[in-house]
Amino acid sequence: MPELDSAQAAAATRLLELISIQRISQAIYVAAALGIADLVAEEPRSAEQLANATGVLAPSLRRVMRALVTFGVFAEDAAGRFGLTPTGEFLKAGVAGSLHPVALYFGGESAAQIEGLLLHCVKTGETARQKLFGKRQAGFERLEHDPEQAELFNATMTAFSTLHLTGVLEAYDFSGVRKIVDVGGGHGKNICEILQRHPNMRGVLFDMPHAFEGGTTTIAQMGLADRCQVVSGDFFASVPAGADAYLLSRVIHDWDDEKAIAILKVVREAIAPDGRLIVLETMLRPALRSFYPVLSDLNMMLRPGGCERTESEYRALYRAAEFELTRTVETTSPTSATVIEGKPA
């Protein structure tokens, strides 16, 4: 076989890196599971020090750390000690914008099993969760029976809320809204941020029962209990009625077109005649500024069974649910969040 020329070698190198990249997400999971970012937050530490603190093998941990240094998650000094980079800062637990729970949720054995079923999803239209757990346990209702997984899921969604809302309040004007319902709002990160910016606004946080306690706690901690009610329910059946704005952040992308339209129709029945539909989603655009939207789209195929959509696809969803898409507003969010505004048609 003839040798590759320089262009071919570069192309093969790129593809080989992409084939192997899944190991980096698992290495990030290892660092998150061991709490490495917090251990080196104050000062750099050697692999031996980190291994002693976490109960793992120093040579193996050094190899994981070396890989993460190569990808800019950690830094290594001349003495072989590891410290944080600006990227690695987001692996610390409990800090603003922390991606620590996200790394745990999308890493480890269970996540690897799900990721390995992408071909199955493409062949059958079935999600990886349906294949692994059966259709009855594939959806969000399984969280009601798994408190540990529910806690991790809700922490992951809160982390995503922080990223997703970044730049939104600067790009989109919520003024004039008297009452807003955050549909599927989890632990209330979004609605709390909006209410804090708008002291005359009232709100309702609406989600499944597994999020009730966390949502109530968040709202109380933010000093908003007198202005924000927490309500549990099923948004396929009903949502609190009469508000003049309904926010759905990272909700519609979880569902196929039929179910997405069904959710929007329920909101359509509840919304005030002059109300605003405010959907906040990662939108697929012709010119993407990051890889995240297309990678998130594959995640939707694997896990909940939804998809990321283009503006024209959202316009069609709105029309089917008797909404008119009035405008889209791009933001600086790391998740490429777009405000997709609508009004009753």
Image: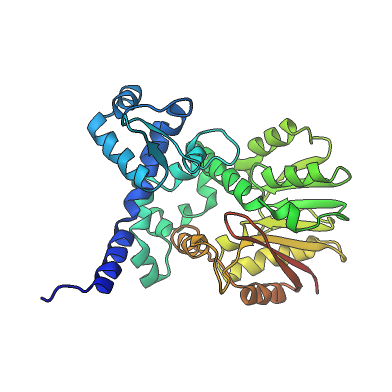
**Is residue 145 shown to the viewer in this render?**
no
**Is residue 334 shown to the viewer in this render?**
yes
Name which residue lies at 56% across and 42% down.
Answer: 154
Which residue is most to the front? 78
Residue 256 picture quarter: bottom right
Name which residue lies at 12% across and 76% down.
Answer: 2
Nearer the observer, 237 or 336: 336
Nearer the observer, 287 or 44: 44
- The x and y percentages for residue 149 are 48, 41
Name which residue lies at 74% across and 66% down.
Answer: 341
Q: Is residue 241 left or right of residue 70?
A: right
Quarter of the picture containing the N terminus is bottom left
Residue 227, relative to residue 293: is it above or below?
Answer: above
- The x and y percentages for residue 144 are 54, 43
Residue 201, relative to residue 222: is it above or below?
Answer: below
- The x and y percentages for residue 66 are 31, 41
Nearer the observer, 260 or 6: 6
Name which residue lies at 42% across and 66% down.
Answer: 126
Residue 316, relative to residue 270: is it above or below?
Answer: below
- The x and y percentages for residue 266 are 72, 63
